[in-house]
Amino acid sequence: MNQPTLEDLAKRVKRLERQNRILKSAGLVALLGIVATVLLGQTTPNQVKKVIETEKIIVRDQEGRIRATLASESCGVALRFRDENDQVRIALATCHDRTNLSFYNENESVGVDLYTSTFFQGSGLNLNYMGEAYEGELYGWTMRAGKIDPSFSFLSPINSSSFTMMMVSEHAPYMFLTGNEGIIWSAP
């Protein structure tokens, strides 16, 4: 019979030890994979967070330009939409006693402003339109529909004048024309 030599036995032991190390490593990797799968699989739809808390959300387009922001500001919250030139075009904001929905022109000047406020004439609805007039000056009109003194005003850039029609608290109509010096004409 062929008896293995000491050298043959040493080679076999070395080969068995190498196979043993490989099997132990493979077993450890498999065990870690199973543990990771079990732990990561623990999140179910009922455990998904349903609230995101932040002070500002920015939405960017494919070129990286800011297109919308939702932010907490010093006196309230504002949602602003921007055009491709980074100009604010629409804003929805709250601040103290006022809530605005504003539409801006290409110069970021308010074109139409719809807001509610309790500051001026009691709570109510206010609608402003501002447009560009002669030589870039602004003109427009304002309508206030509140609990107290509803009014409609035409605004002109010339001498800071305006013409206002309103219903005063006693339900009598009242009209007046203003200029730099204040009221220059009124009726009744």
Image (spheres, rainbow, N blue to C red):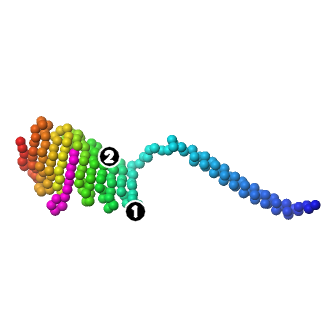
Q: Residues within 10 Å of mark 1 (few under 14, many from 20)?
A: few
Question: In the picture, residue 123 is in which quadrant?
Answer: top left
Magenta includes 132? Answer: yes
Q: Is residue 159 left or right of residue 4?
A: left
- Camera-side residue: 153 or 7? 153
- Residue lying at 75% horizontally and 59% vertically, measured from the top left: 18
Label at residue 76: 2
Q: Is residue 40 above or below residue 7?
A: above
Residue 63: give its label.
1
Answer with left or right where residue 25 lies relative to residue 132.
right
- Relative vertical location of residue 4 with respect to residue 31 in this rendering, above or below: below
Quadrant housing the C terminus: top left
Give amino acid for label 1.
Glu
- The residues colored magenta run 126-137
Q: Residue at x 72, y 57 (%)?
A: 22
Q: Is residue 50 left or right of residue 139?
A: right
Which quarter shows the N terminus? bottom right
Whether residue 133 is visible: yes
Q: How many marks?
A: 2
* Residue at (50% x, 44% y) in the render: 48
Q: Secondary structure at mark 2?
A: loop
Q: Specify whether residue 129 is painted magenta.
A: yes
Residue 89 image-quadrant placement: bottom left
Measuring from the top left, give residue 74's x and y in whole percent.
32, 48
In this rendered view, identify the residue nearer to me: 98 or 1: 1
Q: Is residue 73 visible?
A: no
The CA span between labels 1 and 2 is: 30 Å
Q: Secondary structure at mark 1?
A: loop
